[in-house]
Image (cartoon, rainbow, N blue to C red):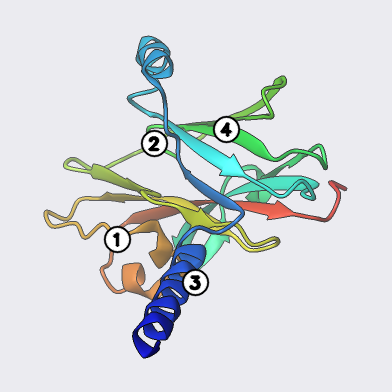
Amino acid sequence: MKKIFALLTLLALLAGCSAEAAPSMYIQPAELNEEEEAVAKLLGADTDQHLFDVVLDGTAKKMSVTAYELADGTWEPWIGGGGSGMALDEKAKEGRLCFGFEDLRKDFREAAQFDGRGYTATSWEGTEDLDDPEGMGRTTSFLAGRAEIVYEKEIPIAIQINTTKNEVHSYDPESFFEPERYAELGYEHVYALTVTFSQEPLS
């Protein structure tokens, strides 16, 4: 009897761990089927286009995308005054996001589609001339796993570094919440891209 009780307890604990590992609302790199992968490659979505799957609970009213530049150890809004907002159908539950950029200082495109309906796209193009010194290199790290969606909380999607340094430490986007890690490394330009889901309507 004790062995059966111990086994049931273990199974309950494992079930609890599984529940924690699989949040009800999340964003993760898109899982494409064979046909979708072929279309993505045809459209160049295997290069500087990054696709993400989104699962919501049907109560979200708004999605906001914000780009930042690291300045004096803190994140300062960078593109479009800090971000772009998109109204969501409150019943939206499953969607796909696409972020397209090579150099965040030059151009950026975002597109979203929920529940297989029409999609919304926004693009931004830099107007200032870039005067990069010789030897400027760039590296970008993207969200690689599943991230839980919590309403009103930013989710880091990408961090991009532009620097002339020979050695570059590229952390997981989660390090967005520790900007001092990048500030200490002294890179010339560090940018971040985040997405936030909200139950507040688009104003």
Q: Secondary structure at mark 2?
A: loop
Nearer to the camera, 146 or 62: 146
User: x, y (%) of residue 94?
Assistant: 64, 37
Mark closer to the observer (1, 2): 1
Q: Earlier in the sequence, mark 3 or mark 1?
A: 3
Left or right of 188? Residue 22 is right
Q: Earlier in the sequence, mark 2 or mark 4?
A: 4
Q: Secondary structure at mark 4?
A: strand
Left or right of 182? Residue 148 is right
CA gap between label 3 and label 1 equals: 30 Å
Looking at the image, residue 128 lies above or below residue 167:
above
Residue at image mark 3: 16
CA gap between label 1 and label 4 equals: 25 Å
Q: Are marks 3 and 2 in contact (CB under 8 Å)?
A: no
Q: Are marks 3 and 1 in contact (CB under 8 Å)?
A: no
Answer few, some or many: residues within 10 Å of disc 4's Cα (few below 14, many 20 plus, some between 14 and 19).
Answer: many
Q: Residue at x 52, y 31 (%)?
A: 98
CA gap between label 3 and label 2 equals: 42 Å
Residue at image mark 1: 171
User: x, y (%) of residue 42?
Assistant: 37, 9
Residue at image mark 4: 96
Whether residue 127 is visible to the viewer of this picture, yes or no, is no
Residue at image mark 2: 103
User: x, y (%) of residue 168?
Assistant: 19, 56
At label 1, the amino acid type is Tyr
Whether residue 116 is visible to the viewer of this picture, yes or no, is yes
Looking at the image, residue 3 lies above or below residue 160:
below
Q: Earlier in the sequence, mark 1 or mark 2?
A: 2
> Residue most toward the left?
166
At label 4, the amino acid type is Arg
